[in-house]
Image (cartoon, rainbow, N blue to C red):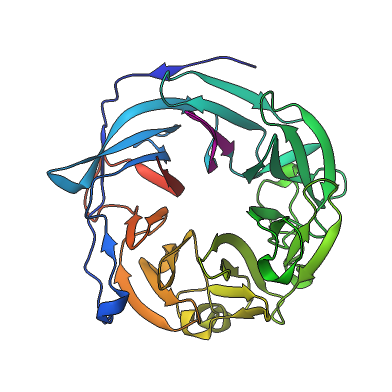
Amino acid sequence: MQRRHFLRTLSAASVVLAMQPMVGAAKTARLSLNSTPATLLAAWQLPGGGFQAGVLNADPAQPHLFTVQQAVDLPTRPHGLMHLQGDEYLVIARRPGDWMMRLNIRTGDASRTWQDADRQFNGHSAVNGKYVYTTETDMLSGSGVLAVRDKTTLELLDVWPTQGHDPHEMLVLPQGGLGIAEPFLLVANGGIQTHADMGRTQLNLNQMDSSLVALKPATGEVLKQWVLEDTQLSLRHMALHADGVVGIAMQAHHGNASRKNDAPVLALLSDQGLRTAPESAGMKGYAGDIVATPQGFVVSCTQSNAALHVSVSGQRLAQFAATSACALAAQADRVWLGHLPASSADALELDNHWLLI
């Protein structure tokens, strides 16, 4: 259960990130896209199959070229990445997942924690004080739960309901955020019921219950819950803007193809409530990752081979091309977007998320 395997060299040691320039953006909304050196924690699939996570370094002379500095083998496809403490990071399996891995990027040490048989990991985590929270699904009921773990040992301490199905990403928000008078956890319930015995088969698309829920970090008590009028929109990944607005990347599950394509892929949560951003529509109803920028949010639209830059009030600022656009990271007005090269047979296929180190 604690088997360690660390690779110091890798034959397919490059990820090409060729960006197209933004089009139609006002000068005040321009971003620096993959144009400066960076070191990122990422996860990927190898050309011949198999999954890894590790550290990517940008080539200062070629800012769109990343090389693998460190890599560790993974048992199945990964999803969420989180900074734990110091040089330690957490990598969690894609749902329905049965493992999470603690990785030290300085020493290369990696240790794996396996899930209990009665729950599955849903791919995301958050740290608050001496606790780590992981979004999970109860195998018997199919309901979403939040597991509370010790940050040092990852030992399970408690399990709380998330008041919905399929919880995805969560944020730790400060006192006063969204009008709530105490610090809280914000959890995105995707609303889609699955069962590990049936893989990722979606069982309740006609009765989806996607929502955002604010929970007390110490007890799991529900402080507030928000839902959208369109119940076929699944709330997945989130980013917090400096002015307190939360952007939520969504995926549409309408049975009608036209309605799905025309569905917005971004929702905005503020003191005034939860609403969709209509100008984010027309992206085949699918958003992957999301990051905040000084002007608003960038959302990767994987199936549309594009990314959108949308203002904090919901106006579309720019759209730029990127094949299988996926992982996003941001620092001020600089954004790093990972996607598949137009032609590169031996490129590593990045997963949905990466983190600046």
Residue 167's spot in the image, x, y percent?
A: 71, 54
Please say if 210 is above or below 14. Answer: below
Residue at (28, 82) in percent of width and height: 26
* Extreme residue toward the top, this view: 3
User: Is residue 117 something one can see in this rendering?
Assistant: no
Residue at image position (24%, 45%) is 37
Tell me the magenta residue range: 80-92
Give the number of marks.
0
Residue 159 covered by magenta stretch: no
Q: Position of residue 194 (x, y in %)?
A: 73, 53
Q: Position of residue 347 (x, y in %)?
A: 28, 42
Q: Residue at x 86, y 47 (%)?
A: 219
Pick the residue in front: 55 or 4.
Answer: 55
Q: Is residue 88 magenta?
A: yes
The image quadrant of residue 80 is: top right
Residue at the image position 33 percent from the left and 75 percent from the top: 319
Quadrant where the C terminus is found in the figure: top left
Q: In this rendering, does residue 330 appear at all?
A: yes
